Image: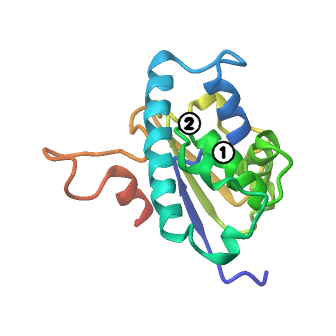
Amino acid sequence: GNSPITCAVVVSNPWNFEGNHLNSKNINGGFSNWEKIVGKVYSLILTTGLKGYLKQFHQRKDLQQRKDVDLNKAFSSYTLSEFDSAITVPMWGYKDLGDYHKKASSIRYLKYVKVPILCINAEDDPLVPSLLWPNVMELENKYSIFVTSKGGGHIGWCQGINPLTGPSWADLLIFK
């Protein structure tokens, strides 16, 4: 086609924001206690980062003039859902948080990928449990290769004596 992209790699892709959100709320069987704890910590860390980013730009006149976003609510948020409800949902025209989660889930778009794509997920990822991975029907795309590992966590796959130095298993796989 006309795309300048010739191939792609996704690592620890959440795939299904809608399912992830519902399962974190203990619907559809829910996450394990470990996954819930890690998810809450991760949500707080990401939310803190987003608030820091927003702090850099919140004085912009175009942002101040928007009546649909709630900057005070965003700055007082502790979860991604709270932040997204205050900023992401209204800013990008979603009806509500559920509409955003559904439309932002990349699993819906996998069938349209027309370049080779390597998808890597770990079975022990506390943020992206395997029950939310693409199923066989969704993977029926001749361009996609789905690689899973028993371990690796969320974007981890550390190895060696000091896992913080050197390439991870995923790094080595991607660059081969």
- Give the residue at the far left of this rendering: 161
Residue 46 in sight in this render: yes
In the picture shown, does residue 18 fall above or below 50?
A: above
Residue at the image position 54 percent from the left and 70 percent from the top: 57
In the picture shown, does residue 120 fall above or below 118?
A: above
User: Percent from the top left, x then y, of residue 134?
Assistant: 70, 40
| Secondary structure beneath label 1 | loop
Q: Nearer the viewer, residue 49 or 7?
A: 49
User: Which corner quadrant holds the C terminus?
Assistant: bottom left
Q: Mark 1 points at which residue?
A: 15
Q: Earlier in the sequence, mark 1 or mark 2?
A: 1
Q: How crowded is mark 2: few (under 14 residues within 10 Å), some or many (20 or more)?
A: many
Disc 1 to disc 2: CB gap under 8 Å: yes
Q: Name the residue under label 2.
A: 128
Q: In this view, does 74 lie to the left or right of 138?
A: left
| Secondary structure beneath label 2 | loop
